[in-house]
Amino acid sequence: MDQDFAGIEPLVYESRIGIPYNWWAGDTATKFFTGLSSERVFYATRCDACNKTFLPPRKTCPLCFAKNLAWKPLAPKGAVTTFTVARRKLAALGDAEPPVFFALIKLDGADTAIAHRLGNVAEKDLAAGLRVRAVFAPEPKGGILDVLYFEPDK
Amino acid sequence: MDRVAVVGIGMVEIEGNKVRDTFETMVFSAVTRALADAGLEIGDIDNVITTSNDFWDGRTISCMAVGDASGARDKNVSCVEGDGTFGAFYGLARILSGSYGTTLVTAHSKGSQSVSSLITNAAFDPIYERTLGLDMITGSALQARAYMDATGTTSEHLAMVSVKNHGNAKGNPYAQLPMDLTVADVLSSEMIADPLHKLDCSPVSDGACAIILAREDRVPKAKTKSVWVKGVSFASDAYFLGDRDLTFSRSLAQAAKKAYAMAGIGDPARQVGLVECYDAFSYQELMWLEGLGICEKGRAKDLLSAGAFDKNGRIPVNASGGLLSGHPVIAAGLYRMAECVKSLRNGSSGKTAVAQGLNGVAGQSHCVWVLGDKP
């Protein structure tokens, strides 16, 4: 039967799914983003039983399930734990033009790292352990891009 | 535990763009091949598990759309959203429940029909991470750098994995990218996201795979040499990349330890005959081998360099060509299982094989199957 289809050029049907979402960020993330925009600090949470400070903040300790962990504001400085440079214009980069620098950054006083972008950095300086500080957006909108990127802290 | 065997496998040729196939025709082809392989009819199948992902398919409740192609009409069918190894785990559990004697497991995806970077970007946390623009390649690149820094693994080692697997694919009629490569070819290919060159990354692929599991009392009806489930387990790590140890997969080590214990394996480095692991990126093959206990942390590069993982080496790893030679997401782990079954049937690489599948960015959770040529 396959030969019956030999002369047929397959039709490619173009489509897309476009569905808007409104995510309630939760009270923990709301506190985090409010602190970021109004105080320029990173609100982590701390579990005294596990002796761990979590960023992004967790309401409940992921290790021992202790509830209502204490807030611990962290200064916007830390060190790169790992990094990459996106050189191809990957669709997820959106409007950003490559090269785009990504890193995991462990803020001073945190036990976990957060993902973010790096800016104003020379490629030769890229390494785990690089000291960085947050560069804040002039007009915060209430999201992770209220920090534009992290830059070397010289 | 009741003894269960894999009695049938069906793979379709993995291609970059199967424009003449729909999801349904791919899955139907895999199912008919698995049934023919086992010498069974669809009436011999007691229940069905389909494995798919709504974002890749561009359709919600995508599992239901392939039910008919999977022969599930008028049968009890359930689904897993994730890698095919997890679908197979569910299929096994259904047999062990006592309710079913046979399970048909299918898995499929067509990467060619959408935009991988956007789909994998949506795997990141929408509040804290997604708008940064990370995707599977850049997220894995963060892991690759951390692993290389911790173990002294170099870009040359990564390239050797790519050379090996693309070369192995030349013997696999289902592989998408059989290639004769040199280390220099890999190192001079496009740098997509440091340290990952294009040839360190698996391609976008279309494919579907099916396997048939049978309880021991149902095995005699199948005509092919049975391959037996000796052990299986899965485990998950934390969701956020920054919570995890990116230099060693704790969740894979946990899953492997339990699967080996079930299989009575105390020394995987000596007792495992071959491995089909989830080499979505070249460095992952080395990192997963360490998590699987095939060697100590940081040692995979040395064994690789010594040829231990070659097709004719001490423990062939991805002798099929692996995912670097064709990576149909979701179906990928089921292909790993089917390749292990093929190898165990022909007996060329020992009596025990390990197949691995994973879910999540940079391998958050892992499923490990230990398969053997005897019950």
Image (cartoon, coloured by chain):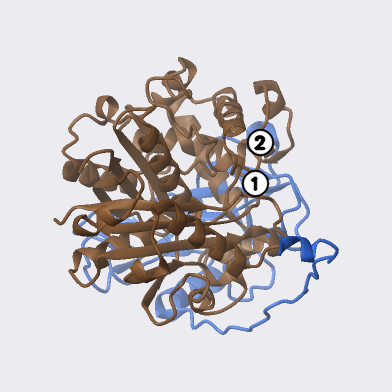
Q: In this view, does B101 lie above or below B325?
A: below
Q: In this view, does B226 lie above or below B293?
A: below
The answer for which chain carries disc 2 is B
Query: Looking at this view, is B207 or B73 the one in front?
Result: B73
Pointer 2 and pointer 1 on the same chain: yes
Q: In which quarter of the image is residue A17?
A: bottom right
Q: Are marks 2 and 1 in contact (CB under 8 Å)?
A: no
Relative horizontal placement of residue B260, taking residue B116 as reference (left or right): left
At horizontal 81% and vertical 61% (from top left) the residue drawn is A6
- Regarding mark 1 in the picture, which secondary structure is present there? loop
**Disc 2 target residue:** B199
Query: Looking at this view, is B66 or B141 the one in front?
Result: B66
The answer for which chain carries disc 1 is B
Relative horizontal placement of residue B104, taking residue B281 as reference (left or right): left
Q: Position of residue B172 (x, y in %)?
A: 57, 37
Categorize mark 2 by other alpha carbons within 10 Å: few (<14), some (14-19), many (20+): many
- Regarding mark 2 in the picture, which secondary structure is present there? helix
User: Among the chains, which one is brown?
Assistant: B
Q: Where is residue A15 in the image (x, y as percent from the top left)?
A: 74, 76
Mark sitting on residue B203:
1
Quadrant of the drawing holding the C terminus of chain B: top left
**Residue farthest left in this picture:** B1
Q: Where is residue A85 in the image (x, y as percent from the top left)?
A: 66, 43
Query: What is the total number of numbered labels drawn onto the structure image?
Result: 2
Q: In this view, does B100 lie above or below B190?
A: below
Query: Mark 2 belongs to which amino acid?
Result: Leu
User: Among the chains, which one is blue?
Assistant: A
**Visible residue check, residue A129:** no
Quadrant of the drawing holding the N terminus of chain B: bottom left
**Visible residue check, residue B185:** yes
Mark sitting on residue B136:
none
